[in-house]
Image (cartoon, grey):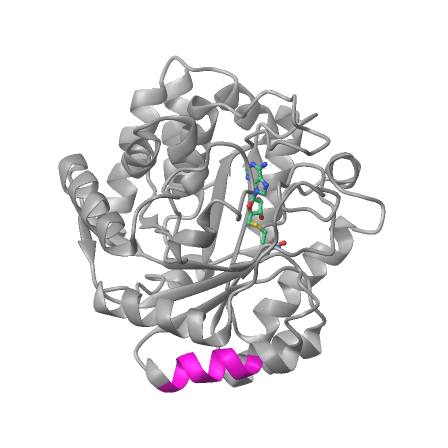
Amino acid sequence: MIKNIIDELKSNKNLSDEKFKILLNDDTSDEYLFKQADSVRRQIYAADVYLRGLIEITNYCKNGCYYCGIGCENRELKRYRLSKEEILSCCKTGYELGYRTFVLQGGEDIFFTDKKICDIVSAIRKNYKDCAITLSLGEKSKESYTAFFKAGANRYLLRHETAKENHYGKLHPEYLSVKKRKQCLFDLKEIGYQTGSGFMVGSPYQTTENLIEDLRFLQELKPDMIGIGPFIAAKNTKFQNFPNGSLKLTLKLISILRLMFPYALIPATTALGTIAPNGRELGLKAGANVLMPNLSPVKYRNLYALYNNKICTGEEAAECRGCLERRVKNTGYRIVTDVGNVRKAVEELKS
Ligand code: SAH
């Protein structure tokens, strides 16, 4: 019965809400689901795994999302921001280690004006013409996104977090809205960014219906990249005592996403590696094809404390690279050094 549903998902890239619900709540055929997702990922991407070097440029944030450890309500956290020189030096290290995509991520820090961001982006673009520059700096106006794009940024990551308004309201303060969040995503696509979205699995008050809403929103958005990871409690936040999201459900959703969006770039996230020692390896086996190793200077790493016990805060970038190489190889995949474009995205969507 469940296997039939998985086969249907694989051939139609879609299911009814009822069938999604059955699939999400039944664990009996998980291994079969992972295998089907892996076969689809191998058809399109073979055993290739792309790396995205993550540079956490600031932990200052003007927003107070209830789940996030770097939100403005957290007065206990020491704050930092990287200088332009520090950011460029992270890119240099990353480039030498074979990274061809840099992701500049941060809280919504008003210090980084559009002018400063554009200046940093154009400096990276000038030095690394063969690289993708990805930004993940939260919600901005369409004008700002356009300015960053003109300066040389070509990808943007902005998870929608949860698609349903009432659930969004339980995770965020009243000055943030899912409507605005979604508008930002459509703006990014319109400007021409390769756009990534995604959601947390097991966030407080999340229901199976909410997860199905998330899948439906992604069908509407058609993102190039889809990042999901388990919610993990963060100290000094409103949700510090809530249980973490589950490994099993996250893996299952990775597989479901791979079957729904065969072309998508799907990372096995740091949060997945944090809830289980081999979480990222299991993510790859369930259909993920991207890893996002940390390129931030080690001295600031534990300050980008989105959630508790975040992994990889101690190693230098080069050690991190070696560790990943081994992990990926032992799991039966291979790291490739190129910019890692979406394969067949356009054809898939037209069909
Ligand atoms: N300010 C940027 C970057 C946010 S951090 C933005 O708004 O997009 C990147 C992602 O980390 C978030 O989108 C969120 O999904 C995830 N995250 C934040 N807190 C988390 C937590 N406690 N557990 C798991 N993931 C979390």
Q: Is residue 162 magenta?
A: no
User: Residue 214 lies in what quarter of the image?
Assistant: top right
Q: Which residue is at the far top? A: 28
Nearest the viewer among 91 and 192 is 91
Can residue 256 be spotted in the picture?
no
Residue 61 position within the rendered picture, expressed as x and y whole percent measured from the top left: 68, 55
Percent position of residue 112, x then y: 63, 71
Front-most of 193 and 351?
Answer: 193
**Rendered-image quadrant of the N terminus:** top left
Whether residue 87 sits left or right of residue 158 in the image: it is left
Say whether residue 249 is visible.
yes
Picture coordinates of residue 126, whole percent (x, y): 38, 87
Part of the protein shown in magenta: 118-126
| Nearest the eye: 126 or 206 | 126
Percent x, y of residue 89: 36, 71
Q: Is residue 90 above or below residue 149?
A: above
Residue located 30% across and 63% down the image = 340
Could you tell me which quadrant the C terminus lies in? bottom left
In the rendered view, tell whether residue 138 sits above or below residue 287: below
Query: How many numbered marks does the figure carry?
Result: 0
